[in-house]
Image (cartoon, rainbow, N blue to C red):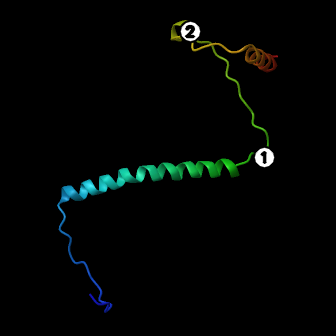
Amino acid sequence: MTETGQRVVVVDLRIPFVRLVLFFVKAAFAAIPAAIIVGFLLMLVTALFAGLDRPCIVRWKLFTLPNNHILRRAGTLSAPDRRGVASATGSVLC
């Protein structure tokens, strides 16, 4: 075939509807990993450039919970963590 610069114009595609739908479904599934990667990169860029100009403020919410709502015990705090919680609680309540 010689290179004469001929142009090709597509006039009609004969693709069954079901195959076309399957193609678009496959394309949508193929785009999911790319969307995850782009989302992660945007999250990373936002985290790097979204510096706060002052320290954050933590609001405490104190409430009681009936014992029958507690399903199981997940674990215990270490001694230094218990002291930290007690200190923070004391500074909030006093």
Residue 84 picture location, percent across and down: 77, 19
Q: Relative to 63, does residue 14 appear above or below in the rendering?
A: below
User: Which quadrant of the rendered structure holds the N terminus?
Assistant: bottom left
Residue at 62 percent of width and 49 percent of height: 44
Judged by depth in the image, the label closer to the viewer, 2 or 1, is 1
User: Does residue 76 sit above or below 54 in this rendering?
Assistant: above
Q: How many marks?
A: 2
Whether 32 is drawn above or below 7: the answer is above
Which of the 4 image quadrants contains residue 13?
bottom left
**Mark 1, residues whose alpha carbon is within 10 Å: few (<14), some, or many (≥20)?**
few
- The reply to whether dot 2 and dot 1 touch (C-beta < 8 Å) is no
Residue 72 horizontal/vertical position (percent): 53, 11
Per the image, label 2 sits on a secondary structure element best described as loop
Image quadrant for the C terminus? top right
Residue 37, image x, y percentages: 51, 50
Looking at the rendered structure, which numbered label has been put on residue 66?
A: 2
Between 38 and 69, the one lying in front of the other is 38
- Residue placed at 17% from the left, 68% from the top? 14
Q: Give the mark nearer the N terminus: 2 vs 1.
A: 1
Q: Name the residue under label 1.
A: 53
Which amino acid, mark 1? Asp
Residue at point 67% right, 18% down? 62
* Towards the viewer: 93 or 47: 47
The answer for how far apart the CA atoms under marks 2 and 1 are is 40 Å
Q: In this view, does 35 lie to the left or right of 90?
A: left
Residue drawn at x 69%, y 50% is 48
Q: Label 2 is placed on what type of residue?
A: Pro
